[in-house]
Image (cartoon, rainbow, N blue to C red):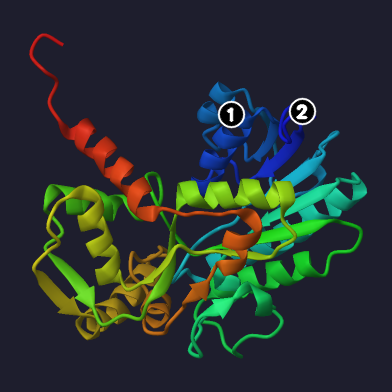
Amino acid sequence: MPPFWEGRRVFMTGATGFIGRYLAEALVRHGAQVSALARPRADTAFLRSLGVRVVPGDVTDPSTILLGDAQMVVHGAAWVGFGLTAKKNKVMWRTNVEGTRNVLLSAADAKVRRFVHVSSVAAVGSTPAGLYAEDRLDPAVRLPYFLSEYERTKWAAQRLVDEADGLKTTSVLPGVVLGLGGGFEPLMRMFLSGRLARVPVGDAPTGVVHVRDVVAGIVAAAEVGDGPYLLVDENLTLWETIELFAKASGRPPPVKTMSWAWLKAVIWPMEAAYHLAGKTPPLSKELYRSAMVPKTYDAARARKELGWTPDALGALAADFEALAEARRPAAAGD
């Protein structure tokens, strides 16, 4: 039999995003024929360089979701945002929830054989009772509050997938995703250069995972999974994540720390000022509240059923080596 991905026709959403770029590269490398929905203004040069067929469109516009003869849909398009203005929250809902509904309906109409949903642990939310595992994963049964509008949208989108008729679906729910190209890259660069002078301490642990391990989990779930699957390597506080950076890079962690209570005094007026200007603040009440409650997850099912073996430390070591190499001056005569 030919390998699973060889010649398989895959339609992706979210391929221009952080996880999507890594996933598209992996699928092409495995031999899949990949098409990707991308908004007209999106930078698709990387996808095109891989040989991905770009389909102009948007998940919020069903008429543009042209699946062709796709055998599989991998839906990863989502807007990740915290502390957004009310107007932007509405756009996030249209993208994350209505967009998921549109892609599900398009996949059902096209009689796609398999639908893989790249969700988030945000669909589960906080876990004050301890480790949350896949064997009790049911977004319909969760704590009766949301720490952010992003959580609310991911919960609603996950329910749509779980309740979809006429489709074979599976979902993967990554934790906070580390790696080059993502939201943590600026922090990694600051750490490597020694500019990360202080680190907030006192936050609750949350599940983290490297983007390359997320991609490995998605690929395995698409091949053999019957999810949903939590994709979390370790449950760490921010300080523990910085210590992971130190182990991966061989550099010492910062010495000085600060309290989250001090940050709270800064965040509240900062958010108000940014909202008055119609902008999204770099730190927000939603992020603060999210940091104060545990969000810990057990990915034992993914490890057992998918053979998933994440290694955030090893992947981060490669990331830091790449960053360090980019900072080195060229040798004389090069």
Q: Locate the C terminus and report the quarter of the image it occupies.
A: top left
Q: Please give left or right for residue 201 compared with residue 43 in the image.
A: left
In the image, what residue occupies the spot 61% across and 72% down? 123
Q: Where residue 250 appears, x then y in whole percent?
A: 17, 50
Q: Is 40 placed above or below 109 here?
A: above
Q: Where residue 253 appears, x then y in whole percent?
A: 15, 61
Q: Please give left or right for residue 165 compared with residue 116 in the image.
A: right
Q: Please give left or right for residue 15 compared with residue 275 in the image.
A: right
In the image, what residue occupies the spot 63% across and 31% down? 30
Q: Where residue 49 appears, x then y in whole percent?
A: 54, 22
The residue lying toward the viewer, choosing from 220 and 253, is 220
Can I make out residue 273 in this image? yes
Q: What residue type is labelled 2?
A: Pro
- Circle 1 sits on which residue? 29
Q: Is 206 placed above or below 118 here?
A: below
Which dot marks residue 269?
none
In the image, what residue occupies the spot 75% across and 45% down? 73
Mark 1–mark 2 distance (CA, rounded to whole Å): 15 Å
Q: Looking at the rendering, which quadrant does residue 54 occupy?
A: top right
The residue lying toward the viewer, choosing from 94 and 183, is 183
Of callouts 1 and 2, which one flags the residue occurring earlier in the amino acid sequence?
2
Q: Where residue 108 appears, x then y in whole percent?
A: 89, 52
Q: Looking at the rendering, which quadrant does residue 39 occupy?
A: top right
| Classed neighbour count for the residue bearing mark 1: other residues with Cα under 10 Å, few (<14), some (14–19), many (≥20) | few
Q: Which amino acid does label 1 sit on?
A: Arg
The residue lying toward the viewer, choosing from 93 and 126, is 126
| Classed neighbour count for the residue bearing mark 2: other residues with Cα under 10 Å, few (<14), some (14–19), many (≥20) | few
Q: What element carries label 1?
A: helix
Which dot marks residue 2?
2
